[in-house]
């Protein structure tokens, strides 16, 4: 699906503020705790203070690491009645500039990263407040690619969301995909070309995998990150609403 083009940008706005302005009803109370879900690694778990069981979501950070933006997005998702675990693939480290971010990403061992995220899924699955059959993932940029890698590892998930993350277009490798996919991209993304997005979409459809691709016109990489020069507030909010609708149809049904 191709979404309409808008040229208006505002770096002073934040996703969480825009999302709140479109939320109806009274926000629920959210419990936030540190969670050592993987040996030597602590993430953050956000849970609605309501009775019952909820779907679980592992949220995967960008190459900046676990920062305030990711935590606030996790809180917003928890407010939609999900238990959200913010995973940490950088073991407590965070970057403040691209050079630092590149160094953190360069030190990632892909096998260990998958093990880390699988531990996050298991941590949620073992939580008495989580429906163990309704666990998904969401990631932005670096985290979007990791969201896909986890699904291709054979982990039993109910849904994954990829925000402009690295894609796989090898049909043999994609044959391991059994999970519904939502992909969010911009047509001006120099890192994830439109052709690769369309190839990814086509291959998954051939494999019979449920896939929803939303390609926003006139926006580039990291358009949903309020600290990015490419930030596009209207598209970012629309993408978030599509994410909530996708999770509702896959994790709440």
Image (tube, grey):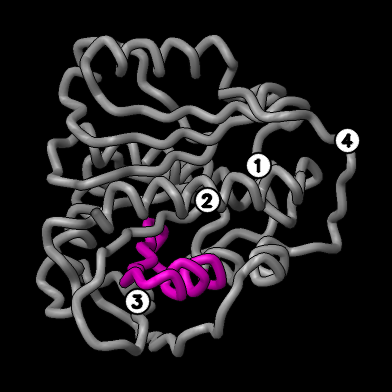
Left or right of residue 247, residue 75 in this image? right
Residue located beneath label 2 in the image: 62
**In this rendering, the label closer to the viewer, 4 or 3:** 4
Residue 173 falls inside the magenta stretch: no
Mark-to-mark CA distance, 1 and 2:
9 Å
The answer to whether the residue labelled 3 contacts the one labelled 2, judged by CB atoms less than 8 Å apart, is no
Mark-to-mark CA distance, 3 and 2:
17 Å
Q: Mark 4 or mark 2, which is nearer the start of the sequence?
A: 4
Q: Which mark is residue 222?
A: 1
> Residue at the spot x=20%, y=68% of the render?
124
Which image quarter is the N terminus in? Answer: top right
The answer to whether the residue labelled 1 contacts the one labelled 2, judged by CB atoms less than 8 Å apart, is yes
Q: Mark 1 or mark 3, which is nearer the start of the sequence?
A: 3
Few, some or many C-alpha atoms within 10 Å of disc 4 (few <14, some 14-19, many ≥20)?
few
Q: Magenta segment, which residues? A: 71-92
- Give whichever of 111, 2 is nearer the camera: 2
Label 4: state its secondary structure.
loop
Few, some or many C-alpha atoms within 10 Å of disc 1 (few <14, some 14-19, many ≥20)?
many
Mark-to-mark CA distance, 3 and 1:
24 Å
The answer to whether the residue labelled 2 contacts the one labelled 4, judged by CB atoms less than 8 Å apart, is no
The image quarter containing residue 172 is top left
Q: Which mark is residue 7?
A: 4
Q: Which mark is residue 45?
A: 3
Label 3: state its secondary structure.
strand
């Amino acid at each position: 699906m191709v979404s309409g083009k808008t040229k208006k940008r505002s770096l002073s706005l934040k996703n969480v503020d825009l999302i709140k302005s479109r939320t109806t009803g009274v926000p629920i109370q959210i419990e936030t705790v540190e969670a050592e879900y993987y040996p030597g690694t602590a993430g953050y778990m956000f849970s609605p203070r309501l009775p019952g069981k909820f779907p679980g979501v592992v949220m995967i950070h960008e190459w900046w690491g676990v920062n305030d933006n990711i935590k606030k997005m996790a809180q917003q998702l928890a407010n939609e009645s999900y238990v959200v675990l913010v995973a940490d693939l950088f073991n407590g480290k965070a970057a403040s500039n691209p050079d630092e971010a590149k160094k953190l990403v360069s030190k990632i061992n892909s096998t260990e990263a998958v093990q880390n995220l699988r531990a996050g899924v298991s941590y949620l699955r073992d939580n008495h407040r989580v429906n163990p059959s309704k666990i998904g993932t969401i990631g932005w940029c670096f985290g979007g690619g990791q969201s896909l890698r986890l699904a291709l590892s054979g982990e039993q998930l109910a849904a994954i969301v990829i925000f402009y993350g690295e894609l796989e277009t090898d049909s043999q490798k994609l044959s391991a995909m059994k999970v519904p996919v939502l992909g969010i991209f911009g047509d001006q993304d120099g890192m994830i070309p439109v052709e690769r997005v369309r190839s990814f979409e086509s291959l998954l459809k051939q494999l019979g995998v449920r896939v929803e691709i939303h390609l926003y016109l006139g926006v580039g990489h990291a358009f949903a990150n309020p600290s990015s020069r490419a930030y596009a507030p209207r598209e970012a909010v629309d993408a978030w609403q599509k994410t909530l609708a996708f999770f509702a149809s896959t994790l709440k049904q």
